[in-house]
Image (cartoon, rainbow, N blue to C red):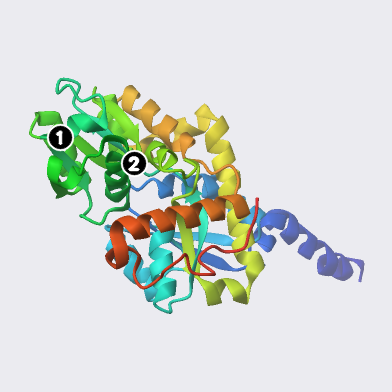
Amino acid sequence: MFRSVFRRFFFPVVLLAAFGPASLAAAEFGTIRAGVLRFGTVSWELDVVKRHGLDAKEGFTLQVQEFAANDAASIAFMGDAVDIVVEDWLWVARQRAEGVAVSFLPYSSAVGALVVRPDRGITKLADLAGKKLGVAGGALDKSWLILQGLARREAGLELASAASPVFGAPPLLSEKLASGELDAVLTYWPFAARLEARGMTRLLGVADAMAALGVPPTTPQLGYIFKEGWAKANPERIAAFSRASRAAKAIMKESDAEWEKLRPLTRAEDESTFRTLRQRYREGIVASWGEAERQAAAKLFAVLAELGGEKLVGKAKSLPDGTFWPLVW
């Protein structure tokens, strides 16, 4: 009789000890499916989340799905194949203006930089006149519009006509700058960091250009986006994800040893590249998020609406309500 009672009560306790409270807690909010670009920087943070069990600690299971291109991740998100992807809030604002209820939580304030060859005598924006300038993305790229706005304000320069812009994919532009076919490149921050490590000169960060236009450089640019209905069905789920994300960033900000574990994911070609990537990533970590930051983003939206018009911001005349999910830290 004693053995029967012992089995009945002892074995569940053994199972609880074996699987641990974290495993049971992970079932509380279920699985969160995150879509990421293969070899993209978002995967670095999510790797930290998984290795440190930050998802289980916060009561959910993180499932990471990799995609070969940003468009594929966006399609998967719109088709509900994943719950969360990373985009900029401008994209979210356009979606909301068109009736698609998507919301945003900050991921990073890092955007990109203007990098120049050190042998072309480019020390200020006015020196870009007559130069071949590579621009990652298209003519309505947000960073390109910000740079044009600053050149117009500071130097009276219409950069789109004064320089010779060449639009293209970041890897191709990097090689053309290195070979001397281009004089300067405005590109996304990981590519700018790699160019810095190869001896190119970082002339201006896009965040610095924003500051010159009256927008705080720490204003978040990229964020985790998700369907509003999905988040409203269980608001604690997205709050738990946000806490796990911030905990991962705290580790990445303080621990060089953690970056040694991330080194293979960075695909850094050498020590200089690795250190520059680490530095620039840390600079983009968002320290706070509240009404002040939301107002700064609204101000930037107004600047971009003026520079890019409806082709850039869509039908929205101002930043649509609900663009930012109401969490504060």
Q: CA distance from mark 2 to mark 1?
A: 21 Å
Q: Earlier in the sequence, mark 2 or mark 1?
A: 2
Q: Residue at x 20, y 43 (%)?
A: 159
- Residue 272 in percent (x, y) is at 33, 23
- Residue 9 in percent (x, y) is at 84, 66
Q: Residue at x 65, y 60 (%)?
A: 59
State the SS at label 1: loop
State the SS at label 2: strand
Answer with left or right where residue 6 lies relative to residue 49: right
Q: Which mark is residue 129?
A: 1
Query: Within the image, what quadrant is residue 135 found in?
Result: top left
Q: Is residue 226 above or below residue 149?
A: below
* Closer to us: 265 or 243: 243
* Quadrant (top left/top right/bottom left/bottom right) for the N terminus: bottom right
- Residue 67 in percent (x, y) is at 32, 59
* Dot 1 amino acid type: Ala
Query: Within the image, what quadrant is residue 24 found in?
Result: bottom right
Answer with left or right where residue 137 lies relative to residue 105: left
Mark 2 touching mark 1, by CB under 8 A? no
* Dot 2 amino acid type: Gly
Outermost residue, left side: 181
Outermost residue, front side: 156
Residue annotated with mark 2 = 112
